[in-house]
Image (tube, grey):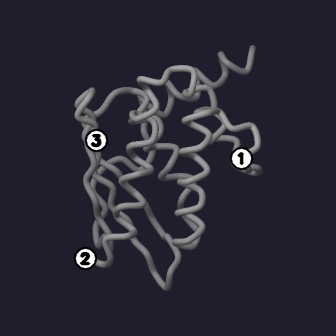
Amino acid sequence: MKSDELYQEVLLQHSRHPRNHGALEHATHRAEGNNALCGDEVTVEVIVTDGMVESVHFQASACAICTASASIMTCEAVKLSEPDVMGLAQTFRKLATDGAADCSIEGRPALDVMGTIHRFPQRVKCATLPWETLTAALRSGRL
């Protein structure tokens, strides 16, 4: 199986069966994001304890790319410090916008799945919206 086919399958799995989808009880941070161009709406809720992200959940009315990206994000952001999550979000944005081969996502193969999204500029916002919403939640301060 070619890597593009494998990546497509992973995206479909995350889209059809998203991880950490639904409300997060006792969330400490929350933000909402939307993409006016396509209608994607995402809410991200986070539990942060002592500067570490313990849990991330999302709720969405969104396309398959946005849903898959949010699902992957909720898995990748846990057990990281807030600054590390912010850095990972920035790296993901670079990967999604220009396929940056130089961006360091070593040890995070799930993010590679989104590495071809830059070929479809109209879908970049769909992929980055959950990450932007996560960083907005962390910047917003505690609930």
User: Compared to 125, does 59 lie above or below?
Assistant: below
Q: In which quarter of the view is residue 60 placed?
A: top left
| Label 2 SS | loop
139 relative to 113 in the view: left or right = left
In-front residue for pair 60/132:
132
x%, y% of residue 37? 26, 28
Q: Residue at point 50% right, 20% down? A: 120
x%, y% of residue 80? 59, 68
The residue sitting at the bottom extreme is: 50
User: Compared to 83, does 5 lie above or below?
Assistant: above
Q: Which residue is denoted by mark 3 in the rendering?
A: 60
Q: Residue at point 43% right, 29% down? A: 65
For the residues carrying marks 1 and 2, which lies nearer the camera in this image?
1
x%, y% of residue 53? 49, 70
Quadrant that contains the C terminus: bottom left
Q: Which residue is denoted by mark 2 in the rendering?
A: 143
* Mark 1: few/some/many CA within 10 Å (<14, 14-19, 20+): some
**Amino acid marked by disc 1:** Cys
**Amino acid marked by disc 2:** Leu
- Label located before the other in sequence (3 or 2): 3
Q: Which mark is residue 142?
A: none
104 relative to 44 in the view: left or right = right
72 relative to 126 in the view: left or right = right
In-front residue for pair 17/115:
115
* Mark 2: few/some/many CA within 10 Å (<14, 14-19, 20+): few
Q: Which residue is denoted by mark 1 in the rendering?
A: 103
| Label 3 SS | strand
Give me the C-alpha separation between circle 3 and circle 1: 28 Å
In-front residue for pair 124/25:
124
In-front residue for pair 66/124:
124
